[in-house]
Amino acid sequence: MKGSQLYEGKAKKVFATDDPELLIVSYKDDATAFNGLKRGTIEGKGAINNKMSNALMRLLEKKGVPTHFVKELNDRETLVKKVQIVPLEVIVRNISAGSFSKRYGVEEGIVFSAPTIEFSYKNDALGDPLINEYHALALNLATPEEIADIKKYTFQINDVLKQFWASCGVTLVDFKLEFGRLSSGEIVLADEISPDTCRLWDSETGKKLDKDRFRRDLGGVEDAYQEIMGRMEQQIGAAE
Ligand code: 5GP
């Protein structure tokens, strides 16, 4: 049973349940970018992100990656395991784009010979600054064992997702993950995997099918979310 609201974030609300180990996540259509400076609504986004994230987490579970996913309850709501979020945003890049291109002064679209991984300190007041493993340890954000688990799962997730999106005719450019600790201490994938958190480009045309359409005012935002959802739904059964 859905209990009281515990938290409201930029894209999701979190509710308590009867079971102290379980929570309900409710996805909103609200969209923000640039640390909340740009705000808007993407009609239908909540339902799409809910369904997509759940399908991808089920796929990852089958491939041996532990996640917080328990059960999809309805269009927008999902039952998840309660975790304590590790305050690191884990970013994987296969191709240059976004802040990587800006920081290093390179064009978007350079295909890397191996994926990169970077961490941001999840802290809105500081604007999620880039952080390295030594700093994360110094700040007690995670233990060395947790960071090792996070990196291992992250590269595994990249392999699974890259292959899955390729089967949909979509190139996985980069994405952001968040991990959490269960009450047992086990590290699991948490948060969401969606066009809000991934850059997804049509493999043939390079068309952006993700939140960059909103961030950069490219138009066709809703259509892009529908399109990427449609592509995923066609392939997900075969992948599982
Ligand atoms: P960049 O660092 O280039 O802005 O983002 C790299 C990737 O991580 C992109 O796929 C982007 O969607 C995702 N990402 C990075 N930070 C955030 C964040 O705070 N929120 C969301 N939703 N995605 C993020």
Image (cartoon, helix red, strand yellow):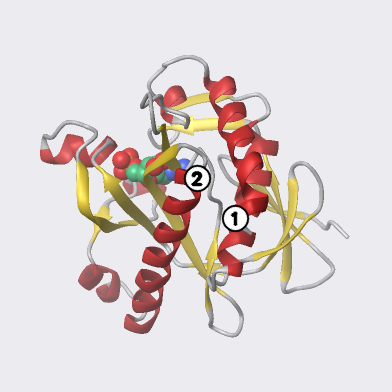
Is residue 131 found left or right of 89 in the rendered image?
left
- The answer to which quarter of the image holds residue 142 is bottom left
Residue in the foreground of this view, choosing between 168 and 37? 168
- How packed mark 1 is, by other alpha carbons closer than 10 Å (few <14, some 14-19, many 20 or more), is some
Which amino acid lies under the numbered mark 1 shown in the image of this protein?
Ala
Residue at label 1?
239
Q: Residues within 10 Å of mark 2 (few under 14, many from 20)?
A: some
Which residue is the extreme one toward the top?
219
Ligand 1 lies under 8 Å from the Cβ of mark 2: no
Cα distance, mark 2 to mark 1? 9 Å
Residue 133 position, x and y percent, is 25, 70
Residue occupied by mark 2: 167
Residue 7 in view here: no
- Residue 229 in view, yes or no: yes
- Which quadrant of the figure contains the C terminus? bottom right
Q: Which amino acid does label 2 sit on?
A: Ser
